[in-house]
Amino acid sequence: MPSTKLRNCIPTLLLLFLFCFLVSTSHGRRIRVTRNSTYHSDNSIVYLWPLPKHFTHGDQTLSVSPDLSLSLQGVGSNSSVVQEAFERYRDLIFKSWAQVGSTSEYDVSTLTVLVSSDDETLQFGVDESYILYLDGKQSGSIVGGATIEANTVYGALRGLETFSQLCVFNYDTKAVEVYNAPWYIQDEPRFAFRGLLLDTSRHYLPVKVIKEVIEAMSYTKLNVLHWHIIDEEAFPLEVPSYPKLWKGSYSKQERYAVEDAYDIVDFAKKRGIHVMAETDVPGHAESWGVGYPDLWPSENCTEPLDITKDFTFEVISSILSDMRKIFPFGIFHLGGDEVNTDCWNNTAHVKEWLTNHNMTTKDAYQYFVLKVQQIAIDLNLIPVNWEETFDNFGEKLNPLTVVHNWLGPGVCPKAVEKGFKCIVSNQGVWYLDHLDVPWEKFYTSEPLEGINNTDHHKLVLGGEVCMWGETADTSDVQQTIWPRAAAAAEKLWSPLEATTVNNLNQTILPRFQYFRCLLNNRGIAAAPVTNFYARRPPTGVGSCFEQ
């Protein structure tokens, strides 16, 4: 891998809610808990991240019962995904020592979640939209209390995250409150692919750490973990068909059993997150030969993989077949970047093969990429390749190819012009290992930049921030990822007009600092927002909300 490297609105309910909102604000309704929160003192700022697509709110304060219960309704009323998520969010919202009073003392004592489908299949493009109503039960509104409506369980998960961010603990009253109620939110993502790459070849990351990253992704509504499991440095994954491959791991303790991979995929699915695995060929594969030296052209030529042998493609086919069982996501990354073919020309039997097949090394590179693409397609996988494959082969790539940008701006406009889909990861603005790239660049980068034909916009699946692991391990990976990855997450979720602003420091920075503190409060080691270099500790004393 590159080492530098709504839900359709229900008109009747909407009109009813808006009517009741107007009525409730004119009836002098009783406020049960006095608001006292310095970081919610500016009513012009909406402290939600990412910002919802549509919302309205009032100026009231609601109290939320620490004994908040779930009423799961609709066709998806038996969803364990939603039930488990509700319990997780309850633990995030309330203090463990919170005292439960009479239900009548609270404005919100039940959260109703209505899910229109019992299909929990997590496929690309699944409906993540939701509608959230939040009003006091004494307001006279039929939709009083808290209600989330979604077409799928995954839309319900996104609604639960938004609900949790509206709930704020007041240390003066020792109660959870919702400010600026009543709320009406109708929300859905701008892009279907909102990814984060995690590299476990340059440094091994324990399963627990990977899960912590996934958990934090769910807080930002990112939905694709691009797991760069394998690279030239290490092969930590168990492959049942070729059990010697993980001899290429750093040590026997730095490995992922098949069961680990299944566990990670299941954990991610329960948070509405896909896991896209990557097998980067023909370059970036030196570690494969530790267990199977025949994959190397020679001892002095350890990558690219040996193009002359059927064995090479048999191994690749088996790896993809085994991974297909573990990773159900229908999009698979095949790499294809940074391929230096010089040693093919300097290895006698490879050079002879090239001559017999009337190929240059560039022709052979293309042959290798296209052959592996076909293996993936035969397994019903959509191939993703880094942009060098498009730069070199253009329209010769399989038309199903998703081109993954990384080298800089400009390739996606060219790719979509040729009818290919594209994912944006411009290293100048969305590479997390580039510690001198500030949050502002992550936030202002526009995935559709340079694509003037609006018919082509749909070919940009979305974008991905990349956490390459050369200088990150368990000790610092979280603070390298967060909070900057969250800046890109809002760009990928929220409407363009909501993220296109003239003064970031006035309109975005306070919300971003608040969200960074929320991550910290949830146990995520997000670094200070305004550091010159990412992941460094604070430069002095001060509030979390001002760093």
Image (cartoon, rainbow, N blue to C red):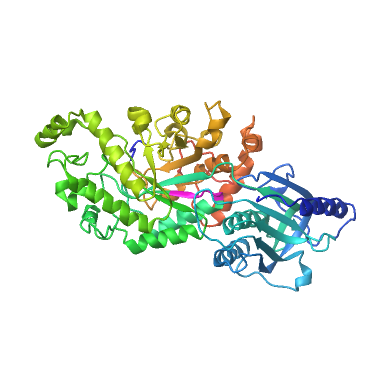
Tell me if residue 445 comes above or below residue 520 in the rendering.
above
304 relative to 60 in the view: left or right: left
- The foreground one among 435 and 468 is 468
- Is 222 magenta? The answer is yes
- Is 120 magenta? The answer is no
Give the image location of residue 350, x and y in percent. Answer: 14, 35
- The foreground one among 36 and 309 is 309
342 relative to 425 in the view: left or right: left
Tell me if residue 371 comes above or below residue 209 in the rendering.
above
Give the image location of residue 488, x and y in percent. Answer: 53, 40
396 relative to 516 in the view: left or right: left
Give the image location of residue 346, x and y in percent. Answer: 13, 31
Give the residue at x 76% y 66%: 106
- The foreground one among 368 and 448 is 368
Give the residue at x 12% y 41%: 298
- The image quarter containing residue 533 is top left
- Can residue 99 be seen here? yes
Q: Residue furthest right?
A: 27
Give the image location of residue 470, x and y in percent. Answer: 33, 43
- The image quarter containing residue 282 is top left
- Can residue 279 be seen here? no
Quadrant for the N terminus in the image: top left
Q: Which residues are magenta?
A: 220-225
- The image quarter containing residue 396 is top left
318 relative to 535 in the view: left or right: left
Give the residue at x 13% y 32%: 356
Q: How many marks?
A: 0
Quadrant for the C terminus in the image: top right
